[in-house]
Amino acid sequence: MATTTKKPTSKAKTKTTKAKSPTKKTVAKKAVPKKSTAARTAAPKATAKAVSARTTSPFKRIGVTLHSLRSLNMAAAGLFVLLALVAGYFMNTTSYSLTLGHLAQDDLASRTHTVFAPAIQSVYDVEARWLVVAVLLLSAILPVLYLTRLKDRYAQYVNTTRMLPFRWIDLAVTGALMTEIAALLSGVSDVPTLKLIAGVVVVAAVLGLIAERQNNAVAKPVRSAYITGIVTAVLPWLLIAAYAVATVVYGMVRSPWYVYALYAALLAGLALQARNQRMSLRGANYLVVERNYVAISILTKAAFAIILIAGLAK
């Protein structure tokens, strides 16, 4: 009897252990989905970080602060003053004649009545080096003001708004002068025509300011003034291109190399400025936008000066 009672007990224990083993397997199986769920939830986060890393500007990754902007403006002011000194000393005395078109009497054709013919009158000769020096010194004024008199207003604009009026004043003045110089080197010597070119560049800068004002505090970007400003900025270059083509076709000669290099530098700067403003309209960090503007200004004006210094060296 004792033997028979022990055998069922061992069977019962065996059944109990067999019954417990599926429970462990079940627990193990249930633990696996929890780990896979955590892995699946972590994957979108990693993907989002990867996407944001690809779409983030390099300026954002290195961190743009007001202090870095001031350092960049300090470097810009120093570089422009240094290039102005170099241009004034190393450039030659090549001068260009500014003319004024008018009508005059054709003495040979005026026999029975007065016959008018187009004529030009030279009004002033200007040396290219002093034009370059003027552009560089004017370009150094705004960075110096950002570091001194306009320091607080500059910080307020870039930190609390999405517009900076002072920048567009600088682009209007220096951009107009650089475009006039490019036109003068291309053969445009008529003073009213040169001033008309400068006026169109000023209008383009004003439209850029209007575009920033329109998009200062809006959710959806307004592109009307931005597109109009780009079209306006391109118009002077159509006139310059006409003179450049006429020089080759009718003059049977090519302009010096530095004239074409000047075209490339100024048009590249114009394209970069337009792209940066487009990024601003899309809602990019305005500290990044301002740093881009300062960097593009430095590169464009430095290239402008270096090209003319090398091309018109003594």
Image (spheres, grey):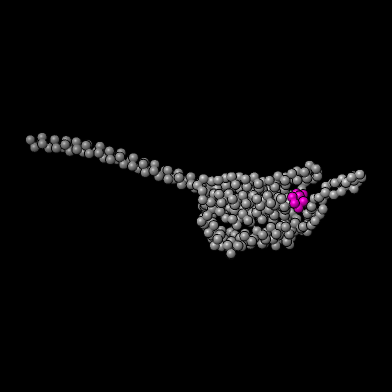
Instruction: Indicate the position of residue 275 as horizontal and vertical percent values.
Output: 59, 47
Horizontal side of residue 62 vs 122, given as left or right: left
Which residue is painted at 55% across and 61% down in the image? 153
Vertical position of residue 29 compared to residue 84: above or below = above
Q: Which residues are magenta?
A: 186-193
Asked whether residue 74 appears in the rendered view, the answer is no
| Residue 216 in sight here | yes
**Residue 303 in picture, x, y percent from top left:** 67, 54
| Displayed quadrant of residue 287 | bottom right
Q: Is residue 309 magenta?
A: no
Query: In front: 257, or 16?
Result: 257
Instruction: Locate residue 244 relative to residue 230 in the image: left or right.
Output: right
Identity of the residue drawn at 60% across and 47% down: 225
Q: In the shown orientation, is residue 202 left or right of residue 3? A: right
Quadrant of the frame with the C terminus = bottom right
Q: Nearer the viewer, residue 125 or 86?
A: 125
Quarter of the rendering containing residue 84: bottom right
192 part of magenta stretch: yes
On the image, the x and y values in percent for residue 276 come to 58, 49
- Between 24 and 146, the residue placed more toward the observer is 146
Q: Residue furthest left?
A: 1
Left or right placement of residue 199 versus residue 36 in this view: right
State the residue at coordinates (26%, 40%): 24
Quadrant in the rendering for residue 36: top left
Q: Which residue reaches farthest front? A: 113
Relative to residue 124, is residue 250 depicted above or below? above
